[in-house]
Amino acid sequence: MRNLHTTEQVKKLKHALEGAGIHVEEECADGHKHVDLCIRYAKLYIEVEGPPHFLNAKQIIADFKRDDYSTSGGFETFRIPNEYIDNHCYKLVGAIKKVLEYRTKLSNSSNNANL
């Protein structure tokens, strides 16, 4: 693990996702950066972010570059403000489950098209 100071929000979301039966990895490296949470089978990265990621132009631009790298590898990045986990964690888990179903179906249909 890269960060020995994983935020409480990351821990809370990871625990809630695992409680919903979702296999999630914490502090994953993609060759360019580390991400807070990764759901590899759906090619989804989850970044739990504080205010600088939404209010600081330099950070926003840096995040765009990080996201471009992830997208080039077939991964999408979902950025969640800390407050959403604090106040809406279980609703987020429900939404993420639906996104995982969608991404899994999308992946399966493209794999079947290549057969």
Image (cartoon, helix red, strand yellow):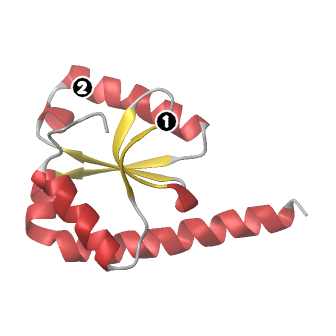
Q: Is residue 93 above or below residue 51?
A: below
Q: Pick whichever, 31 or 112, lies toward us.
A: 31
Q: Pick whichever, 51 or 97, lies toward us.
A: 97
Label ID, residue 59: 2
Camera-near label (1 vs 2) is: 1
Residue 84 vs residue 29: left or right?
left
| Mark 1–mark 2 distance (CA, rounded to whole Å) | 19 Å
The three-letter amino acid code for the residue at tag 1 is: Asp
Give the mark, 1 or 2, whose residue is nearer the N terminus. 1
Is the residue marked by circle 2 packed among few (<14), some (14-19), or many (20+) residues within 10 Å? few
Quadrant housing residue 24? bottom left
Q: Position of residue 110 (x, y in %)?
A: 75, 62
Quarter of the picture holding the N terminus? top left
Is the residue marked by circle 1 packed among few (<14), some (14-19), or many (20+) residues within 10 Å? some
Q: Position of residue 17 (x, y in %)?
A: 31, 70
The three-letter amino acid code for the residue at tag 2 is: Gln
Q: Residue at x 29, y 33 (%)?
A: 2
Q: Give the labeled residue for mark 1.
A: 30
Q: Position of residue 18 (x, y in %)?
A: 33, 72
Q: Is residue 114 above or below residue 77?
A: below
Q: Position of residue 51 (x, y in %)?
A: 11, 39
Quadrant housing residue 89? bottom left
Give the structural element (helix, strand or loop) at label 2: helix
Q: Residue furthest right?
A: 115
